[in-house]
Amino acid sequence: VNQLTVLGIETSCDETAAAVVRRESDGSAAILSNVVRDQLDLHRRYGGVVPEIAARAHVELLDAAIAQALDDAGLTFEEIDAVAATAGPGLIGGLIVGVVTGKAIALARGLPFVAVNHLEAHALTARLTDGIGFPYLLLLVSGGHTQLLAVEGVGRYRRLGTTLDDALGEAFDKTAKLLGLPYPGGPEVEKLAKDGDASIPLPRPMLGRAEPHFSLAGLKTAVRQAAQQRAPLSDQVVADLCASFQEAVAEIMVDRTGRGMALYLDQFGEDAPRQLVVAGGVAANQRLREALDRLCHAQGFTLHAPPLALCSDNGAMIAWAGLEHFARGERDDMTAEARARWPL
Ligand code: KG4
Ligand code: ZN
C-alpha cells in the first residue's frame, strides 16, 4: 500500500473541525493536524445547539479551520490524496456546508471526495489510535446515539442493541438542564459528581434484560422527581444528584455492555478477538471508562477508549474514516448529498 494523506471536514453539529491524517505504507497512522473550533459561546445562552446559528457559524469558521489544518500539518493541497467530509447524520444545515466545501475543494484541486458517516467515523477511531483489527464490539455513546454494535469490517456493522428512547449524551444533557447546569451537560455533571455522594436512589432501567438494549428517559425523569422532592436545591444536593445519576449510568452501561459481550461471542465464536471499543462524546466520561475497564478485566476483553480530544467531534476521525474507505478504492462522486438521517 502507498502512503495516504486525507483532509477531513466535520460540521454535523456545533464543532467546526478540519484535520489531516496520514497512513504510512507500513500501515502506521498519524494525525498531522486536528483543528476544532467549538461554537459553545454562540449556543450556551439557548441551552442547546440552535441549528440555524450552527450552520451560519460553520460558513464563517470552516475555511479558516481548513487552512489552519493544512498549515499545522505543514502541507499544501498538492500533498493531499483525498478530501473527506461528514455527510450525515446530523443537523442538515451544517452538513450541507461541510459537504459543499469538501466537494468544491475536490473539484478545484482534482482530488477524490469521500462522504463520511459520522457514526462510522466514531466507530473506526480506535483503529487510528490503537491500530486494532476486526472484529470488535463497539459501545457508541454520543448526544444522538446509544448503540452496541459488532464491527466486522469497514462498512460492515451489526447492531446488537440500541436505545428505546433517549441517547446517553441526551440523558446527561437533559439531567444537567433540569438541575440548572449549562450546556453541554455531560462534562458539567461529571465535574459536579466528583463532590457528590451517590446516595440518592435512582432506577436502573433494563438491568438484567437478555437483549442489550437501553432505556434512559426514565432515569432523567427520576432525577427530576428526586430534585423536586429536595427543592430548593443546595449545591451539595445538586452534586449528590449528579453523582447518583452517573453511578446509575455506569451500572446500566456495564450490565448492558456485558450482555453485548455475550451476544458478540455467541455470534462470532468464543475465539473472536475480545476487544471493546467505547466511542462518541460520552466516552470522555472517566467514571464510565473506569466501570467499563473493570468489566473488560472480568470478561477478558481489552478496552480501547480514544484520547479525550478524539471522543468529542473532530476532523481527524472523519479524515480517518475517509482514508479507510479510500484505501479500499471507494469514493463518492459530485452527486453525494448531505443527509440528516443515516443509520449505520
Ligand atoms: O459525539 P458528540 O461530541 O456529538 C454527537 O455526535 O452527538 O457527543 C456529545 C455528547 C453530549 O451529549 C455531551 O454532553 C456528551 O457527549 N459528553 C459527556 C462528556 N463529554 C461530552 N457526557 C458525559 N461525560 C462527559 N465527560
Ligand atoms: Zn459525534
Image (tube, rainbow, N blue to C red):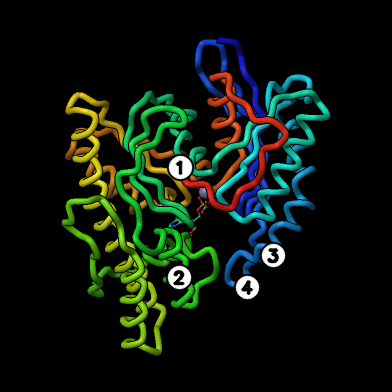
Q: Earlier in the sequence, mark 3 or mark 1?
A: 3
Q: CA distance from mark 3 to mark 1?
A: 30 Å
Q: Dot 3 surroundings within 10 Å: few (below 14), some, or many (20 or more)?
A: some
Give residue 174's mark: 2
What is the x, y in percent for residue 280? 46, 47
In the figure, 303 relative to 61: above or below?
Answer: above
Give residue 223's mark: none
Q: Earlier in the sequence, mark 1 or mark 2?
A: 2
Amino acid type at circle 1 is: Leu
Q: Dot 2 surroundings within 10 Å: few (below 14), some, or many (20 or more)?
A: many
Give residue 46's mark: 4
> Which residue is pictured at 68% across the width and 25% down the height?
82
Q: CA distance from mark 4 to mark 2?
A: 13 Å
Q: CA distance from mark 3 to mark 4?
A: 8 Å
Amino acid type at circle 3 is: Leu
Q: Residue furthest front?
A: 335
Q: CA distance from mark 3 to mark 2?
A: 19 Å
Give the residue pinned by disc 1. Answer: 344
Q: Dot 4 surroundings within 10 Å: few (below 14), some, or many (20 or more)?
A: few
Amino acid type at circle 4 is: Tyr
Give the residue pinned by disc 3. Answer: 42
Q: As drawn, is 192 to the left or to the right of 313?
A: left
Q: CA distance from mark 1 to mark 2?
A: 25 Å
Q: CA distance from mark 1 to mark 4?
A: 30 Å
What is the x, y in percent for residue 337? 66, 43
> Which residue is pictured at 63% across the width and 73% down the height?
46
